Amino acid sequence: MTFITKTMLTLAAGALSLTGLAQGAQAEFAAVGDPKPAIILFGPTNDGGWSQSIDEARQTVEEELDMRIPQAEEIPESATAIRPAAELFIDRGSNIIIGSAFGYSDTFKELSEQYPDILFINPAGITNGPNLKSVYGRTYQSQYLCGMVAGGLSKSGKIGFVAANPFPLVNWTVNAYLLGAREVNPDAELTVVFTGAWGDPVKERAATQALVEQGVDVIGQHVDTPTPQVVAEEAGIYATGHHRDLSEFSEATQCSSVWTWDKFLVPEIEKIAAGEWEEAPYGAFLGIDEGGTDVACCGDAVSDELKAKVMEARDKIISGEAPVFAGPITDRDGTERVPEGEVLSDADLWAMDWFVPGVTGGE
Amino acid sequence: MATTENLSLRERATKPRPAFRLVPLLEPRQKVGETRRIAVYAASLGLAALLSVLLLAVSGVPPSDLGTEIAATAFSSPRALGSVLAQMAPLVVAGLATAIAFRANFWNIGLEGQMILGAICATAIAIFDIGPEALRLPLMMLAACAGGMGWIAGPAYLRQKLGVSEVITTLLLNYVAFNLLLHLLYGGWKDPVSSFPHSEQYEAVERLPQLGWQTLTWALPFAGILAAALWWILSASRLGYLLDLLSANRDMARAVGVPVAGLSLAAILASGAVAGLTGFVISAGIEGRMTQDFHVGYLFNGVLIAFLGRNHPLGVVIAAFFMAVLVQVGQSLQVFFGTPFSLVRLTQAIFIICVAGSEFFLTYRMNFRSAS
């Protein structure tokens, strides 16, 4: 995961050239020849969300690169569990270890230092090094597009959002969702409920029901289960999904923000095979067309006109013509966050602790 | 010929029974020798291994490969032993915490909550750099004990004064503790370096030092010393003797002058303190910081280990080792054969059920007698 704090940026700007350091370190790492990846999966392969999206990418990569990728599932975020799984794979000849969790970050860092000839890649991680790359997606891009769908479908202009935990990478999906909705419906308002858990169907159901009772007619989400979709269908309203195409769980789903890890992993593994892999001091922060999150759009309720609008916005995000967090953006307390003519920096994205006007909840 | 259902009572009573029928008769054993105990456990492990191999063979894992891969690779290398021992350390402490409470007939289901409070208090010492560096670790340890004790004190009071079931109170306090943990990690205690939701990394003086073999830290000897100390207290000291009296028969113990209330309270608080230490061992001995999910799974593992270890410190150590081996073998199965985790979990369950079930054969003698 690209991760930059303001302090780190300042340090990098003032201190020795980071690229110089990176190249020096990269020279040490060139050992992976014939790539033999293995995956350590945080959840079960059928969790319907995060872990399953990685498992599905594994199958695509296996087909496209004609290789077999062994995998160990349900490895918890604890050093005592991650390390033996990684070392068993390394003993068996794996030379690329792919993780899948934020909680693997520290252990992957230690392992990468201990095994300089092995390459480590960690989706959702936050540590990087000469042979370690953390990866995350610019999820706000796809959530912005799903927000457009929500704005177009909402009759009342009241939109609900069920979110996991209030911290930057969730906050930005909430903000982007409303910005997208307002692109279509300028009066749209959004109420967010944080459940405090990544996957808790009971709390998610309660949160969604509370939002339905407040009169929202579209539900967005950034949690690990399809519960909000299921409740939306029961209530006869629309919903949008996260992680995977959640229309398989509920007909209410009209758009989903979906991981496309294979689009990142295939070229990445090819680069490794060709000896062209490069260290990224801040990891990889993947856009909508680089293996981050794309959209599965749209459901039957979405008009052709709205769908065309969404796809046009998608093209403009890819080309850089219309970035999601383009100024002027003021937060709901009146503080200016992005001046006119500028775009929110990655550093500010990773520190996002504010909400745009029109967002209720999340205090 | 009439079926049994159609026979009248009278007919049934006079109907000739089969000439020879065996009826199992259960007799409680008065005394179980060590040899028999070991033999029964060994037989149960053998049965579990046999069932698991059969199950895996049906799912396409050749038994011969199982032998070479699991036995040769997973057990012979020092690294495999190292990772089993590393996983075992916090399990021992968690099992001890549960066992102490169970010894006093206090069903402490709040291990995870007490672990969290222990880790929170220890982390507070680390974050705010309280005390001189040389005393930092002992202070963190004391704070962890205090945190765990504090979290169990409420349920202990409610149980002793008002008779409120500790199963409910300790269990529910787990959720309160978890939300407190999230509140801190997503709020004031988030990592100042990355602003991600885990505490800042502990400094070197705030971590249990490396042992110098594999990746083991002092967490393992710490668990060992704790187990030995508790073994002495529970098995050799006067306190342990009184506690045995108390758990055998509370009224009788009171009648002969055992300070029942004080003694149970002491055992309950000790359980909370050791639970707090579990949180400390994981944070300072394994993760190097307080993470969001460090406690997950320890409640059930703690109960299981205390049960398998018969609430005895030495038994707890053996049971924790057994559990760590199961985890290691489970990972090996996934890595070597691509066995799905659900199947791995099934084989683990077979082992646990077989060992737990063997208890029956130690408690009872089964006599088959002819019913005729």
Image: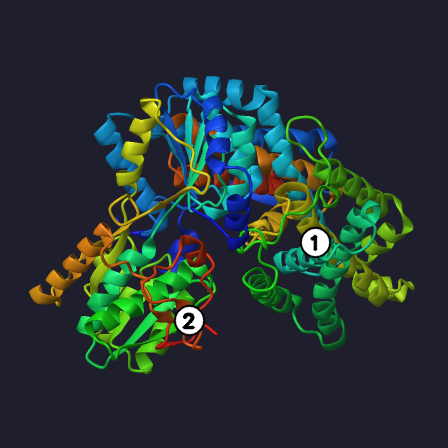
- Provide residue B189's location: percent of width, then percent of height: 61, 60
Q: Residues within 10 Å of mark 2 (few under 14, many from 20)?
A: few
Q: CA distance from mark 1 to mark 2?
A: 48 Å
Mark 2 belongs to which subunit? A
Q: Quadrant of residue B164 in the image? A: bottom right
Kind of residue sitting beneath label 2 = Glu
Mark 1 belongs to which subunit? B
Checking the image for residue A336, the label placed there is: 2
- Provide residue B287's location: percent of width, then percent of height: 61, 44
Q: Is residue A177 left or right of residue A331?
A: left
**Residue drawn at (52%, 18%) of the image:** B72
Q: Is residue A192 left or right of residue B193?
A: left
Kind of residue sitting beneath label 1 = Ala
**Residue drawn at (43%, 33%) of the image:** A279
As drawn, the residue found furthest toward the left would be A304
> In terms of secondary structure, where does tag 1 sit?
helix
**Residue drawn at (43%, 19%) of the image:** A31
Check the image and report above or below for B313 versus A36. below
Callout 1–callout 2 Cβ contact below 8 Å: no
Checking the image for residue B275, the label placed there is: 1
Q: Are marks 1 and 2 on the same chain?
A: no
Q: Is residue B241 visible?
A: yes
Which residue is nearer to you in this view: B293 or B241? B293
> In terms of secondary structure, where does tag 2 sit?
strand
Q: Residues within 10 Å of mark 1 (few under 14, many from 20)?
A: many
Checking the image for residue B289, the label placed there is: none
**Residue drawn at (32%, 33%) of the image:** A268
Q: Quadrant of residue B272 in the image? A: bottom right
Q: Is residue A41 left or right of residue B218?
A: left
Q: Which marked residue is nearer to the observer: mark 1 or mark 2?
A: 2
- Provide residue B335's location: percent of width, then percent of height: 43, 29
Check the image and report above or below for A146 versus B309. below
